[in-house]
Image: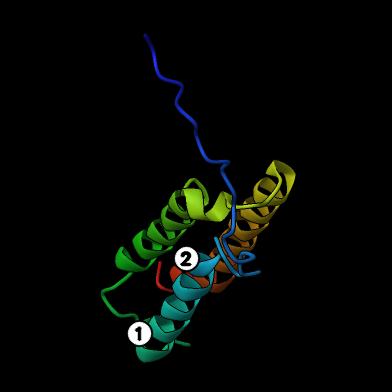
Amino acid sequence: MTAAVTVPPVTDDHPRPSPLGGLWAFLGGGMVMAVTVLLLHPVTRQQDCPNWDLYLPMMALGWLALIVAEQVLPIAWRNRPVWMVAGRGLAALLTAGTLSCCGLLPLETLCH
């Protein structure tokens, strides 16, 4: 004899996701990059070039990698349609890439 097993219905009673959910790496990384550049005192003359020309592009690539990693986490997908997550992730990557290139490229070309 087998006993019937009753399973309670699954309810998704999580609160609504934050509008910024899945974009924390974009926002936090952007602030870290901006503060880092400001603390390094951006140069305006080639004679003042510091020795951090390798670290800054590596930080920018790390920022982009963290944005990609955050977009594949389940928390970024919670109660959102696929098109919204993909669109937000793509927008964050394009914005971060553009800001990195436009913000760091002048510093890099000045020093080389």
Q: State whether residue 100 is above or below residue 77.
A: below
Looking at this view, is 30 or 11 the one in front?
Answer: 11
Q: Nearer the viewer, mark 1 or mark 2?
A: 2
Of the pair 41 and 19, the residue shown nearer to us: 19
Q: Residue at x 67, y 51 (%)?
A: 80
Residue drawn at (61%, 69%), measured in percent from left and top?
Answer: 18
Q: Earlier in the sequence, mark 1 or mark 2?
A: 2
Give the mark count: 2
List the residue tagged with mark 1.
Answer: 47
| Farthest-out residue, top | 1
- Tell me residue 3's x, y (percent): 40, 19
Tell me the distance, in whole angstroms, between the alpha carbons under discs 1 and 2.
34 Å
Q: Provide residue 35's location: percent of width, then percent of height.
A: 42, 86
Badge 1 local density, few (<14 within 10 Å), some, or many (20+)?
few
**Could you classify mark 2 by the number of other residues whose Cα lies within 10 Å: few (under 14), some (14-19), or many (20 or more)?**
many
Q: Secondary structure at mark 2?
A: helix
| Residue closest to the far front | 1
Q: Which mark is residue 35?
A: none
Query: Residue most toward the left?
Result: 51
Image quarter (top left, top right, bottom left or bottom right) of the N terminus = top left
Q: Which of 88 and 93 lies nearest the eye of the viewer?
A: 88
Disc 1 element? helix
Label 2 sits on residue: 25
What colouring method underlies this structural image?
rainbow
In-front residue for pair 79/82: 79
Where residue 23 appears, as percent x and y from the top left, is 56, 65
As displayed, is residue 53 above or below residue 94?
Answer: below
Disc 2 marks which amino acid?
Answer: Ala
Kind of residue indicated by mark 1: Gln
Quadrant the C terminus occupies: bottom left
